[in-house]
Image (spheres, helix red, strand yellow):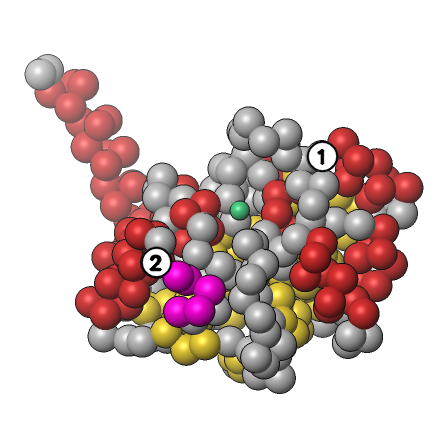
Amino acid sequence: MNKKIVYPFFLILVFFLFYFFVSAPKKSDNLVVFCDVGQGDGILIKKGTEEILVDAGRDNGQMMACLARYLDFSDKTIEKVIASHYDSDHIGGFKSIFAAYDVKAAYGLGPKAGKDTQTYANWLNDLNHEGISEQVLASGMNLNFSDGYLEVLYPFYNTNYAGKNLSDVLKLHYLDKTFLLTGDLELADWEIIVDSKINLESDILKIAHHGSKNGTSQKVLDAVKPREAVISVGKNSYGHPAESVLKMLENSLILVHRIDQKGDVVFK
Ligand SMILES: [Zn+2]
């Protein structure tokens, strides 16, 4: 190649190296990010260099890409990972995260809900390689971090695990807001939770089960009273999000963020 052409390329290369290793801004923001993982759920809670993940999407690299957008290049530790439940569109993406990061602790519904699915076996196998074991969540527990905490609302201690889409329900208290994280919870479980009269009120509701009509009812919205809602949904053949759910949210004057339309939804 001609010297006259090579020289500008060399300058550009030096500039980029300088930018990435010396002057790149530190990504030390305090954030809650509903990551664009396509059809699935993946949530990043970040306080400086402390991270908690609630689900990680499917095994398609999109959660890894999301972490690359918000974590410092040098930050290779994830403090906590939580499985809302064991479907592959929620925990499939943990595989590459365990490979790339040092994960300190893991939480989930436990073996009674995991049953004998391959996805659950893979999760346990990955935890085993990581040298950690799964801690089982039940209501009454709090998972604390530097500047906030996750309150476990569901499942209740000694829940019957018959429900096919049981998910843990977590209320995140952080950034002077409350976020209700709901996995793929269905109406049968919502009935039990709402009828128990526990305080569900939250500023932001992660709509359950990608906006399926079996994941949200007016009774749920009346109990949670959210100002904003996030629908974690991508291209799918299930009809998510349901038109009836979108109408219900609109009628309740709730500001809706759809990940399939907006990409990552970030709260600061
Ligand atoms: Zn799902």
Q: CA distance from mark 1 to mark 2?
A: 30 Å
Is 60 located above or below residue 34 in the figure? above
Quarter where residue 172 is shown: bottom right
- Element assignment for label 2: loop
Give the residue number, with chain letter if any, for mark 2: 116
| Region rendered in magenta | 111-115
Q: Is mark 2 within 8 Å of ligand 1?
A: no
The majority secondary structure of the magenta stretch comes to helix
Residue 235: give x, y in percent of width and height.
54, 29
Between 23 and 144, which is closer to the camera in this rendering?
Answer: 144
Residue 12: give x, y in percent of width and height.
27, 33
Residue depicted at 45% across the width and 76% down the height: 136
Q: Is residue 114 magenta?
A: yes
- Mark 1 or mark 2: whose residue is earlier in sequence: 2
Residue depicted at 67% across the width and 36% down the height: 241
Quarter where residue 3 is shown: top left
Note whether residue 196 is visible. Answer: yes
Q: Is residue 237 magenta?
A: no
Give the residue number, with chain letter if any, for mark 1: 242
Residue 145: give x, y in percent of width and height.
52, 79
Dot 1 amino acid type:
Ala
